[in-house]
Image (cartoon, helix red, strand yellow):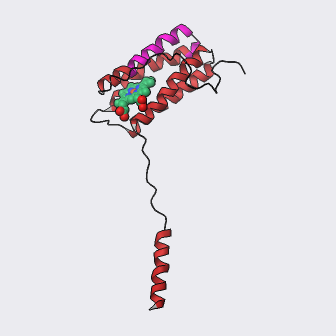
Amino acid sequence: MKFFALLALFLSGIAQAAPREPETYVPGLGEIMGSIQMRHAKLWFAAKGGNWPLASYELGELKEGFEDAARYQPDFKGKPIAEMLEPATRKPLSELVKAIDERDGAHFARAYDQLSRACTSCHESAGRGFIVIQRPTAPPVTDQRYDARR
Ligand code: HEC
């Protein structure tokens, strides 16, 4: 009897130690948007500081954010986010790439405002018209240099 009790205890220990399937973590759309917002703001200050390699980097990260939104949240409360993204952002994103390549501040500012309007209109069509995107007036964090000095 004692033997079986010990055996049962032993086996239940093994069962508990067995690895469990990891739960897959899916980031929410609001979270993904938060990091897109950070990139959007840094992008502005990188260009303003003439740090074009940083601007190019932040734009790449911002695009990855959009890709994440399409991959992880293709449908948001019945809105086909994945399908809305590309047509809404294609033009301003390609203009930003050009402006950064040309290191052209005026072109950059126009394309940036176009992108911000695209952000806001998607929010409007997704029933989030109260989330309005504009040029940032202050850097989002100040422990990173946005200018081109080393
Ligand atoms: C294809 C549609 C779409 C585009 C394009 C889009 N967003 Fe969003 N965004 C949403 C939706 C939908 C929400 C609401 C998510 C929620 O309620 O969980 C949102 C939420 C947000 C939020 C609120 C997050 C918070 O916690 O305060 C911010 C900030 C944001 N977006 C920034 C941006 C920026 C910046 C851009 C452009 C660079 C952008 N979004 C482009 C659909 C979009």
Magenta-highlighted residues = 100-119
141 sits left or right of 80 in the view: right
- Residue 95: x percent and y percent? 48, 15
Quadrant of ligand 1 in image: top left
The outermost residue toward the bottom is 1
- Residue 134: x percent and y percent? 44, 17
Q: Nearer the viewer, residue 100 or 35?
A: 35
Which quadrant would the N terminus be assigned to in this image?
Answer: bottom left
47 sits left or right of 124 in the view: right
The residue at 43%/50% (across/down) is: 24
The outermost residue toward the left is 78
Residue 85 can be seen in this image: no
Q: Nearer the viewer, residue 9 or 84?
A: 9
Which quadrant would the C terminus be assigned to in this image?
Answer: top right
Magenta span: chief secondary structure: helix
Q: Is residue 97 above or below residue 80?
A: above
The outermost residue toward the top is 106
- Residue 3: x percent and y percent? 48, 90
Res. 76 image quadrant: top left
The residue at 62%/15% (across/down) is: 49
The residue at 55%/24% (across/down) is: 140
| Circle count | 0
- Residue 121: x percent and y percent? 34, 20
Is residue 109 within the magenta segment? Answer: yes
The outermost residue toward the right is 150
The residue at 65%/18% (across/down) is: 147
Residue 21 can be seen in this image: yes
Q: Is residue 136 above or below residue 34?
A: above
110 sits left or right of 84 in the view: right
